[in-house]
Amino acid sequence: MTPAGILQAARFRGFRIATAESCTGGMVAAALTDIPGSSDVFDRGFVTYSNAAKTEMLGVHQETLAAHGAVSEPVAVEMAEGALARSHADVAVAITGIAGPGGSERKPEGRVCFALARKGHPTRAETIDFGARGRAAVRSAARDHALLLLSQALQ
């Protein structure tokens, strides 16, 4: 589903959308707000690149960051749930990952964790290893996957 289709589906369901982004730096929010009229369903986007921002803006627990690291499903879940709690949205998607260059053996370049929080439903999380295909390609792939998660939540 295209960003315009996501907005149309949200309008049809009466849903508002929020985003919580780290490695994509607002690319999901930009894809949605590039569409004229998006303000009726897009509530807000949080760009929380640093751990401090994740904690201060979204309520991600220091203990979660210490135990799992910023690139983890538990952090993605707390980001998505924090975005939902700190907005007027009905659905929120979160992204945290290693776009590159760099990474480690344990958390390689291209690993991105996602979470989708929706009022009245359990938050779901998943991790995708996009591979070391370069920073721009990983970020674009992560944006596209987050949009896919939103489209699935709105169907």
Image (spheres, helix red, strand yellow):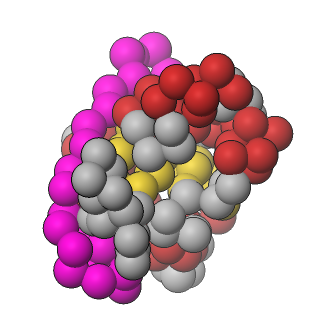
Q: Is residue 142 magenta?
A: yes
Task: Look at 34% across and 57% down and name the residue there.
Answer: 104
Q: x, y percentage for residue 150? A: 34, 49
- Compared with residue 80, is residue 97 higher up or lower down, i.e. above or below? below
* Residue 61 occupies quadrant: top right
Q: Is residue 23 left or right of residue 110?
A: right
**Quick check: 128 left or right of 75?**
left
Left-right relation of 13 to 36: left
Query: Where does the N terminus fall, quadrant-wise?
Result: bottom left
Q: Which residues are magenta?
A: 119-144
Q: Quadrant of residue 118?
A: top left
Question: Compared to 6, does 136 lie above or below?
Answer: below
Residue most extreme to the right = 56
Residue at x-position 46% and y-position 51%:
96
Front residue of 136 and 152: 136
Q: Residue furthest front?
A: 105
Name which residue lies at 26% across and 53% down: 105
Q: Position of residue 18 (x, y in %)?
A: 58, 48
Comparing 66 with 93, the one in front is 66
Q: Is residue 12 something one can see in this rendering?
A: no
Residue 112: x and y in percent read 33, 54
Please indicate, yes or no, whether residue 63 appears anywhere in the rendered image: yes
Q: Residue at x 37, y 62 (%)?
A: 103
**Where residue 52 sits in the image (x, y, percent)?**
77, 46
